[in-house]
Amino acid sequence: MGKLSNNTMQQRKTLNPVDIYTVGHSNTEFEKNGINMEPAYHALQKYFGYTTFLHLQEDIIQDILLKKDVFVLMPTGGGKSLCYQLPALLLDGVTIVVSPLIALMKDQVDSLKANGIAAAHINSSLCFDEMQNVKLDLAENKISILYVAPERLMIPDFLSALKRLNVSLVAIDEAHCISEWGHDFRPGYRQLKVLKEHFPKVPLVALTATATSRVQEDITAQLKLSNPKTYKASFNRKNLFYQVKSKDNAYYQLLRYLEGRKNDSGIIYCYSRKSADDLANKLKKEGHRALPYHAGLKSDLRTETQDKFIKDDVEIIVATVAFGMGIDKSNVRFVIHYDLPKNLETYYQETGRAGRDGEESDCIIFFSRSDMGKISYFIEQKGDETEKQNAYKKLRCMVAFCEGGTCRRKILLEYFGEMYDETNCGNCDNCLNPKETTDGTIIAQKIVSCVAQIGERFGVNYIADILYGSRIQKIVHNRHDTIAAHGTGKEYSKKQWQAFTRELVQLGYLKSEGDRYPIIKLTQDGCDILSGTKGVLLTKPEEKVKIIQKDVDGSFDHDLFEILRSLRKKLADGAGMPPYVIFHDSSLIEMATYFPRSQSDFRTIIGVGESKLEKYGELFLEEIAGYCKEHNIKPA
Ligand code: ADP
Ligand code: ZN
């Protein structure tokens, strides 16, 4: 693999701090809505090592600089943090960031410090002296960004101390925690309702990755944002590959998949604590570094496990839904649902933990209808009838997502109210490998007439049994072994007849009624098939069980990437920080693509700002130079 020319590098990343002021950009280009954005671009490169803003970031930052309240709705990985971190550097005074997880604050602050930004956090993990130091620094206006939990922020003494400082901006991260409709309601967030009264002149920015509109409305109302500008990014996570596999032989399929994923971090979600424990143990025996995580484990152990995952000391976490809220890990390369999620909200949120760094990542569900039973069992425990029906409705949408033959991305986005007009997303199993169809008119006729003959009173399994010619007791008892439809479908398996019947429901040729034990009924369209006035295309039966292995981007040098990854790990361990604080995978991938040789090459790598250039430039350049020499890779 040869080195790309410097020219190419420069094209990709034309601006460095000096260029910004001298080359190609007149001041007017930077001026928008009366705000000169030149300092923002300068800070973007200097501190974060980026040359362009991600979608919406620039507009959001502008509004904040104009001291407006802003509401930011962006999916995970959309780049929310920068929306308040960058203005914090441009505004006088301190930016307060309200964040729910004490455990994450240190990493966030370490990341900022690694970029040369004066950041701090105040929480119970600090000893007395550390706390005093932060307070002193605050009083001397030495801190740009301060992280606190909502409970601490709203302690009256703390609040009045802050009010004496020059607070330039308050950012409320994970703002959905304020809403009881959300998945992570946190009573402490409720107190933030009065924040606006305490800081009437300070702009408030609320940020969340929650896609549901009910939660969104709740947030604006509760925080009393004043006439906020709302920025809603698309919730399409383009870098996530969605795939649903039949749960047959799931363990074997999983092993095959993991074989091709050595060294990659991933989360496997299971339904119960026991299955999480069992699966983690089995994987360990296969030589994978896997650990279980669920609410049944002691809190210390959970923290330790999470820590190992974040630090790349263990690659695979096998978890129940209890896992994830505290996960800010950027390089999660796959999220696998070994059991069916209970609704698309949960699914979107859990898969959202993959690929925060924007790199290609996989989301795979092992789907079996029998998993619905376990979920139904829990739904049945709910007292309230409407709640029950709601939960069933959501479960049916989840199942329709799994069984659907159309673009998964489209189903997902439209569920959350976002139109998606592409005909082929190019990054889900159904778009990459469209299911083949076959003329299903005769199949449909057999099924529809069976439904008619049994008086529209039975479910999918029963129908399949009849067509297949089964003589189970129930069928004999009902004398359905004597009807014309009995035994007319020996050419396919029972499972296949079940699948055909469900597809006909999806297509509207039949309908399904009832929650827990749905029964199949006729529709007008179905009757038209019987009369022969209409033909039907159905999915051709699947023959093999195979996970699609997408070609991962092979255009970088994987060996060098591994070498740089070990260097990153060594440095991170030495500094007691997670590896991604030093560099994201995307930075390492660029290094293993362009083989930077000089400091000026190195600063064009994504994520390399001044501070990282100074701290790590030499070490990484040395490693790259050694590698190039050994492999005879010449500079262009
Ligand atoms: P969110 O909080 O919305 O999940 P993050 O703030 O963690 O997203 O950002 C997601 C990823 O995008 C991070 O790896 C971050 O470093 C990167 N990122 C943010 N802004 C930019 C930018 N302007 N250019 C390139 N990468 C960016
Ligand atoms: Zn698709």
Image: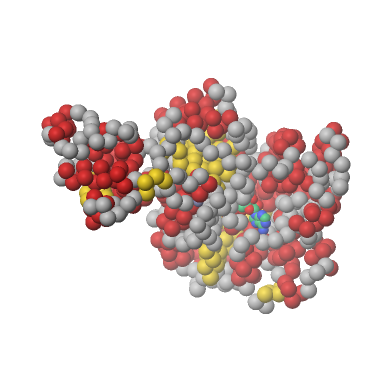
In terms of depth relative to the viewer, which is nearer, 273 or 376? 376
Q: Quadrant of residue 284?
A: top right
Q: Is residue 593 visible?
A: yes
x and y percent of residue 140 in the render?
71, 60
The structure residue drawn at horizontal position 24% and vertical position 39%, both measured from the top left corner, is 463
The structure residue drawn at horizontal position 83% and vertical position 55%, both measured from the top left corner, is 7
The residue sitting at the top extreme is 285
Q: Is residue 110 above or below residue 524?
A: above
Is 268 on the left or on the right of 471, as rendered? right
The structure residue drawn at horizontal position 44% and vertical position 29%, both measured from the top left corner, is 249
The structure residue drawn at horizontal position 49% and vertical position 41%, both measured from the top left corner, is 364
Q: Is residue 574 above or below residue 157?
A: above
In terms of depth relative to the viewer, which is nearer, 506 or 172? 506
Is 528 on the left or on the right of 144, as rendered? left
Is 518 on the left or on the right of 48, as rendered? left
x and y percent of residue 182 in the render?
42, 54
Q: Which quadrant would the N terminus be assigned to in this image? A: top right
